Amino acid sequence: MQYGCRVTSTKAQVEVSYDVSNEFFRLWLDERMYYTCAVFESPDDTLEKAQLNKSRVLYDFAEMNADKTVLDIGCGWGSNLEYLYMRGVKTIHGITLSSAQHEEILKRNIPGVTTWCVDYRDFQPAAKYDALQSIEMIDHLCSPAQSAQGLAIELYREYFGKCRSWVEPGAWFGFQAILRNRVPRSRKDLEDLRFTADVIFPGGLNPRLEELVAAVNPHWEIVELVTRREHYGKTTAEWLRRMRLHERKIRDTWGDQVFQDYDRYLSTCVRAFQNHWSSDVQMKLRAI
C-alpha cells in the first residue's frame, strides 16, 4: 500500500523544524551540531564526548569498517557523516530534506561524503549499500492524525521496506529513534507537548517502541536493542542550559518569540524524559 499522498512531514514542515538558522542552532548544540540523543557513558562526559559515543555505538551496530559503503538517512548538519570520515570510511552518503542542513554539509566539504536534499521515498541509489544508519528521522513519517487512523505501523513498515531495498541480505542497520511512552495527566503538560509537536516539529510524531518492533518485520531482524531515556534527558537539559546562556543574542537576532518557543520546547523535553513521557531507542538491525 502506498502512502505518498499522506505521509506527513513535507519539505516545508521539515524546514520549520531545522531552518531557523544554522547559526542559531550552533549556539547551543555541541561543536559538531548533533541534534539527537547523546550517550553519556561516564558522569564526566561532556556533551561533545557523549555525542561521539552515540556515533560510535551506531557505527558498531552497522558493523562498519573503512571499506564499507554507508547511507545516513536523515543526516542532519553532517555530524555523523563527519564521524564516519574520522573513522576512515571512504564512501559515505547522506540524505536530508532540510535545505539549510544540506547547505551546512556542503560547506563542511567532508572528504568522501556525498549528500542529497531529497525525500527518502524519492531516493534511488546507484548501487546497494553495505550498511545503513538513521538517527531520529522516523518521527517525521507519521502524523498524529494518521496514528489515530491506525496507520502508524504500516507507514513505518513502508520505511523499513524501502531501506531494505537499498542493501543486500545480511547487511546491518544502526537505527535510533525518539519514543513516546506515557501520556501526562495535567492540562499544562499536554498543552506543552502539543505545542512542541505543532510549532517546533509540525507534522511529526514520535513512534511507540512496540510499533517499531512490529514494523521492522518482515524486512529486518532486531539483533540488539537499548533504550536511552536518561541519556536524552541529560542531552536536552544541556541544550537548554547552553541556549539560555545566549538569551540576549537570540532575542536580539531572531526575536523574542524564537527564544520563548525554544525555551518552552526544551523545558518540555527535559520534563518528558524525567517523567517517562518520552524515551529513545537504538537498534541493531540485520537485513533478512
Image: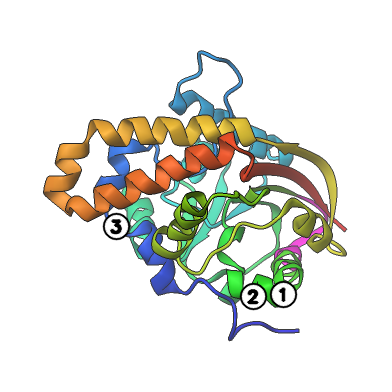
Q: Which mark is residue 151?
A: 1
Residue at the farthest left position: 252
Q: Nearer the viewer, mark 2 or mark 3?
A: 2
Which of disc 1 and disc 2 is earlier in sequence? 2
Residue 31 in sight from this viewpoint:
no
User: Does dot 3 land on a helix, a strand or a loop?
Assistant: loop
Looking at the rendered image, the quarter that the N terminus falls into is bottom right
What is the quadrant of residue 25 in the picture? top left
Instruction: Report the residue marked by disc 2.
Output: 146
Instruction: Report the residue marked by disc 3.
Output: 20
Marks 2 and 3, how far apart at CA: 27 Å
Q: Are marks 2 and 1 in contact (CB under 8 Å)?
A: yes
Q: Amino acid at mark 3?
A: Val
Give the main secondary structure, helix, strand or loop, of the magenta stretch. Answer: strand
Residue 237 in sight from this viewpoint:
yes
Q: Are marks 2 and 3 in contact (CB under 8 Å)?
A: no
Q: Residues within 10 Å of mark 3 (few under 14, many from 20)?
A: few
Which of disc 1 and disc 3 is earlier in sequence? 3
